Amino acid sequence: MFEPEIINMITENFGVSIYMVVVSTLFSYLLGLPLGVILVVTAPGGLKPMPFFNQVLGVIVNLLRSVPFLILLFVIMPFTQFVTGSSFGANATIVPLVVSAAPFVARLIESSFKEIDFGVIEAAQSMGASNWQIITKVMLPESKPSLLVGSAIAATTILGYSAMAGVVGGGGLGDIAIRYGFYRYQNDLMYVCVILLVIITQIIQEAGLRIANKTDKRLH
Amino acid sequence: MNQPIIQIKDLCKSYPSKKGAAVALEHINLDIYPGEIFGIIGMSGAGKSTLVRCINFLEKPTSGTVIFDGQDLSKLSSKELCKARQSMGMIFQQFNLLMQRTALQNICFPMEIAGIKKEEALKRARELLKLVDMENKEDSYPSQLSGGQKQRVAIARALATNPKVLLCDEATSALDPKTTRAILNLLKDISKRLGITVIIITHEMAVIEEVCQKVAIIDNHVIAETGTVAEVFSRPKQDATKRLVYPEDRKLPDFNAARCFRLIFDGTSAMEPVISNMIMDCKTPVNILAADTRVMEGQTFGQMIIQIPEQTSQINLERILVYLDNKHVQAEEVSGCLNLKS
């Protein structure tokens, strides 16, 4: 159906898509996890309530989340250029992906932590646990299944965003779908890319759920 | 020995709210001695859960303080407070076990926090599982355990760091009566074997009667009465105590009979068959209409309503009253609508 070079291009960009998602998700968690922890810990009724700071941080997170990804992509281009030395290609797409996904990840982590029964945290406090011990030994391990489900959601969202970066030649399957399929009316190529994206999304989502269920000791 | 392990001194706690401060506790003073099983009882909303959280400073009192084992908790840094809390175990109504850890790992948890070496912690955790009769469940997760089993693991966990005091916040309120009794017996046994001081917070009289030596009644944010269980429950002085000892739903049906007497047993005539001796001595049959007595620390407390047949002569009647008086059983004539409320 396709010439070998086109098939080559698809496989190559399939790899690029996966690369972008994996690296962006990793960096988003590197930033988003501490941010989410801070949001929960400083919230009123949290381990170390700091209402004003919490509110300011919340507004910043919401602000970043409300900027449409495509606009963010252009706005931070100088920063992207500074970090990666280029303003297009996979590495250059990762920067706006992380900036956009990190606050989202922070909110995901915040909601996972809020699922923890406060009684368990209180029990740890009654044993003389410090706040740091409560975060690392209670909150993180106890919300592990929920965090895993969250990471699948984050990865699929990042995959969706990465496809949008095709508009500026970000690379990956979305890039082909837009450049060849959409702009040059190669519908068959567009469909193939979209179907591949659907399959990746399904796999990430399903794997995330399964791993989460498997590790959740409440279900056995 | 006669130094209190916990001294609560003029403790007040209120929560800020939009309509001024909401008072939870007012001027609480309590001394709790080593090895005691001390009950704190009150209706819901009385402030008892806040009080137990003030004892280990999970809630910081608004004023007043707690002296635990010679240290004033209000003067400790947060690090020192964490250290002090390791000497106070706590168990909860909802058990509050870590759901993602096995029973054994749950018991190891406080030891991890205290920085005890892993092998040592595991060894101690296994001993504790044995103590609470759960040896064969070390690899079970909390979701695989029943309520009573979860509370046993929670007790073992609370004991892991060799605390001097065990705080129990409604520890049996989520359990059925049989399991409640088993858990209470375990607490009693632990207190005796390890010499640990146990503080039990509850809204159930039966829990206090079953295990406590001393009790404090908390009502409307203040301590209404405190003393030994026998003292407080047999001669309740305060309305709050009376409501707990003889709640409204223990009201007995109406009797419209003449010559009814209310007998009050206050522990002085314990194991003696007082009524049957009275019947034989005074040669008068009596009809027991209602009785509500309980045994505390081997003594009988409570009330009984008896009816003396109408044909009984005045002399026999007086003999009965004198007899009862000799046995230190108070008798008073009642008629019409009766109930055992004093």
Image (cartoon, coloured by chain):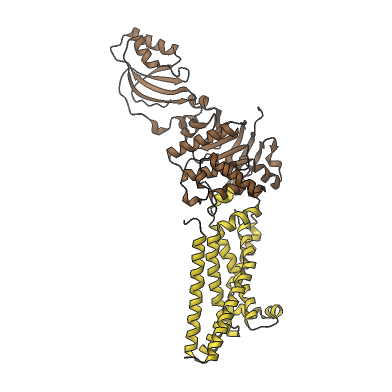
- The answer to whether any part of residue A143 appears in the image is yes
In the image, residue A2 above or below residue A24: below
- From the viewer's side, name the closer residue of A212 and A38: A212
The structure residue drawn at horizontal position 45% and vertical position 25%, both measured from the top left corner, is B295
In the image, residue B166 above or below residue B121: above
- Side (left or right) of B262 relative to B59: left
Q: Position of residue A9 (x, y in %)?
A: 56, 87
- Side (left or right) of B274 relative to B187: left
In the image, residue B113 above or below residue B51: below
- The answer to whether any part of residue A128 appears in the image is no
Give the colour in which the image draws chain A.
yellow
Q: Position of residue A138 (x, y in %)?
A: 59, 54
- From the viewer's side, name the closer residue of A94 and A209: A209
The brown-coloured chain is labelled B
The structure residue drawn at horizontal position 52% and vertical position 50%, both measured from the top left corner, is B139
Q: Position of residue B234 (x, y in %)?
A: 48, 24
